[in-house]
Image (spheres, rainbow, N blue to C red):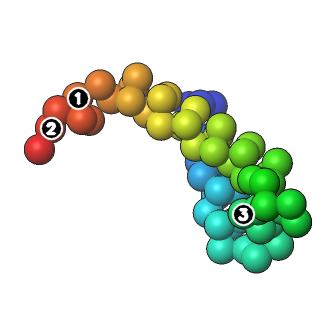
Amino acid sequence: MAQQNLVGVILLFVRATKQSQAYPLKDQQGELSLHHIILRILYQFLLDHYLSMHPTFLIDP
């Protein structure tokens, strides 16, 4: 249950920051911003976690 709550909070965070212009994708030097890198890491973690909980996700039509 706590894991589901954590996932929900992270998804809300990701959704809110995607809609916000306050966190640009790239910084002034054209490098990926630290915030964006953190979001990518969180997203990868969520995807790995979801697929480990639902291994048939990729198999089902």
C-alpha distance separating marks 1 and 3: 33 Å
Give the amino acid at mark 2: Asp
Q: Quadrant of residue 15?
A: bottom right
**As rendered, which of 29 and 55 lies closer to the eye?**
29
Tag 3 residue: 25
Crowdedness of circle 2 by 10 Å Cα count: few (<14), some, many (20+)?
A: few
Q: Which residue is mark 2?
A: 60
Please name the residue shown 78% across and 54% down the image: 31
Going from N to C along the chain, the mark reached first, 1 or 3, is 3
Kindly identify which numbered label has been placed on residue 47.
none
Report if the CB atoms under discs 1 and 3 are less than 8 Å apart: no
Q: Nearer the viewer, residue 27 or 6?
A: 27
Q: Position of residue 33 (x, y in %)?
A: 80, 54
Query: How many numbered markers are drawn?
Result: 3
Q: Residue at x 63, y 31 (%)?
A: 2
Measure how far apart labels 1 and 2 are at the Cα level.
6 Å
Q: Quadrant of the C terminus?
A: top left
The location of residue 16, given as percent across then percent down, is 68, 66
State the residue position of label 1. 56
- Considering only vertical position in the picture, is 11 above or below 54? below
Local crowd at mark 1 within 10 Å, few (<14), some, or many (≥20)?
Answer: few
Q: CA distance from mark 3 to mark 2?
A: 34 Å
